[in-house]
Amino acid sequence: MERIIGIDLGTTNSCVAVMEAGSPQVIPNKGGYKTTPSAVAITESGRRLVGQMAKRQAITNAEHTVYAAKRLIGRKWDSPEVRHCIETCPYEIIEGPHDDARIVLRDKEYSLPEISSIILQEMKIVAQDFLGEEPTQAVVTVPAYFNDNQRKATKDAGRIAGLDIVRVINEPTAAALAYGFGKSLDATVAIYDLGGGTFDISILDIHEGVFDVLSTAGDTFLGGEDFDARIIEHLAFEFAREHKVDLRNDEMALQRLRDAAEKAKIELSSMQETEISLPFIHSTDDGTALHLKTILTREQFEELVMDLVQRTIKICQATLQDSGLTIDDIDDVILVGGMTRMPRIQQAVEEFFGKPPSKQVHPDEAVALGAAVQGAALSSDNADVLLLDVTPHSLGIMVHGGGFEVLIEANSTIPTSHGHVFTTVRDNQTSVKIIVFQGESSRADENELLGEFVLSGLRRAPAGVVEVEVTFEISADGLVSVHATDLETGKQQSITVTATSGLTEDEIDAMISENQDYLVELKRGEEREERRAQIRKNIREVEKLLSGADDSDELIAELRERADAIVSKARSEIDDGDTGVLGSTSAELDRLLQSVRAAAERI
């Protein structure tokens, strides 16, 4: 049976894991690292770079390097989060055809699912190199507080990458699976997950392999990126005060500030202060070079971000209240996400929960490991893990007057369904429009619009006579479908709610086709590199064998003349030859090498 891989599609870094010999295992990439930067770049020549290679050239190619794309996925163009990214990100963000945000790289528009698919594809390749076969199924994690649009956009990203996402699970829930795997636990745990772009808190009851989520909440625009931004603002402000120059208006300087801020943040988790040195950060009109050199202390950093830390604690407080538990009921607190390495965050969590957080899971790897555990559970009939997750948002429809009628409340265990009977509000009304929303406001227009459809053909009757039952269903992925039924005639209309900022099927099919073309070209490129490497190796051996040979030997003289021609030809073709040409050159060089080896043995 094919193994289902688990992927943590992170804001800053992504990670892939698989069940190996009965235990979940993180798969390192070609560089030997267990996480891969969630960065995508297009070079001036049109080459696509992913991961560390994309991150490495971000300073010199800032406009065409995308990072933190997860913060934009599934969001509407006019949302405050998109506006914030437009103001702070070096790459161009434009309005897409479906009220969505899109990114422009080298004059080509990319949807957010498409950008995410490139990262998922990289994780798929990492897994394929390890498994020796192409994985086709995956469990992918998302922030617990992602809404339906964001979850659907993530599934679209999987399709474009050639992956069947068999389950979308919440990141803190995945971390709990990693924490509880292989243990006989009877405990109530809180998962505090602060990553690069999002924050989640989930409270679970774990008992005999059953992981029951009691409550969850979060903020999909609160994470390490915001902590970095505070350092950037601090550095830019101090520099402007001294030199009357705003470095944020210079894209290359701003990217250097970003890199410096991230490094400083990391260093301050283990040091009391760090030096930030950025020589030649700016040149004035008269050619004077300006340098940035300063000391940032841990205390200064904590002051800059204290309100962000407190925001997470307030969400923890509300989630604990929603669970119906008290702090005394929490047996363990698990920290997940790179930002939880910050000592002040650990201190704040300990102060709130009244106990030191557990160190039993790796903050960067736990989510992917848990996804692999869930993947193994889904592919096995004898799975000893049962996951009972919840929906993070209330779901309902708009009713007469603009109110929001909740049909499924937040923190309801999924999968679930719930129906409610409504009546017509006007005499002789022959149709009803069902407008579906997700959120917590009593006013429909203050919540997230998921979709709408019309049930027509109702019989003419006085207001309040015709009854229509509206039923919501939420899958184990947290995805929503709705149907309405005329109770008198049985006539039914339904939709699987389509994300308003999603992609059409034609767009997805076109992206899948383009992605397949890219994979073919990538494979050809890898074959070219392998052939080039072998040709270079054979050239070196031929030259080494012939270098000490006696030219007075007729055979050696003949081989040397032949070698000069073949090696010269190989060197001229090694950089620009296609796979077929290099194959022919490689074969010719192989025959020459065999002859040289035979001659060397004879001598």
Image (cartoon, rainbow, N blue to C red):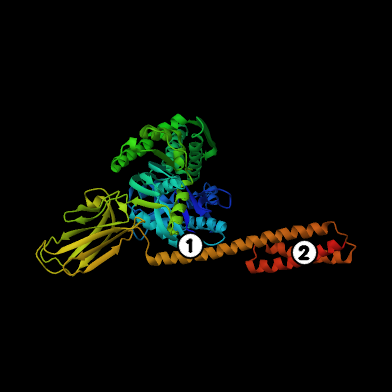
Which amino acid is tagged 2?
Leu
Q: Would you place residue 182 above or below residue 133 in this image? A: above
* The C terminus: image quadrant: bottom right
Q: Residues within 10 Å of mark 1 (few under 14, many from 20)?
A: some
Q: Which residue is mark 2?
A: 593
Tell me if I can see residue 67 in this picture.
no
N-term mark: 2 or 1? 1
Residue in the foreground of this view, choosing between 222 and 603: 603
Q: Quadrant of residue 472?
A: bottom left
**Dot 2: what SS?**
helix
Q: Position of residue 587 (x, y in %)?
A: 71, 68
For this orientation, the residue located farthest to the left is: 462
For mark 1, what is the residue?
Answer: 136
Q: Position of residue 242 (x, y in %)?
A: 46, 31
Q: Is residue 239 visible?
A: yes
Identify whether 443 is placed above or below 553.
above
Q: Nearer the viewer, residue 468 or 570?
A: 468
Residue 515: give its label.
none
Residue at the (63%, 63%) spot, across then down: 528
The quarter of the displayed image where residue 128 is located:
bottom right
Query: Mark 1: which secondary structure?
Result: loop
Q: Is residue 163 above or below residue 336?
A: below
Contact, CB < 8 Å: mark 2 with mark 1? no
Horizontally, residue 483 falls left or right of residue 70, namely left
Which of the two marks, 2 or 1, is nearer to us in this view? 1
| Left or right of 336 on screen, residue 78 | left
Residue at left 35%, top 48%? 212
Residue type beneath disc 1: Thr
Q: CA distance from mark 2 to mark 1?
A: 42 Å
User: Residue 445 or 459: which is nearer the viewer?
Assistant: 459
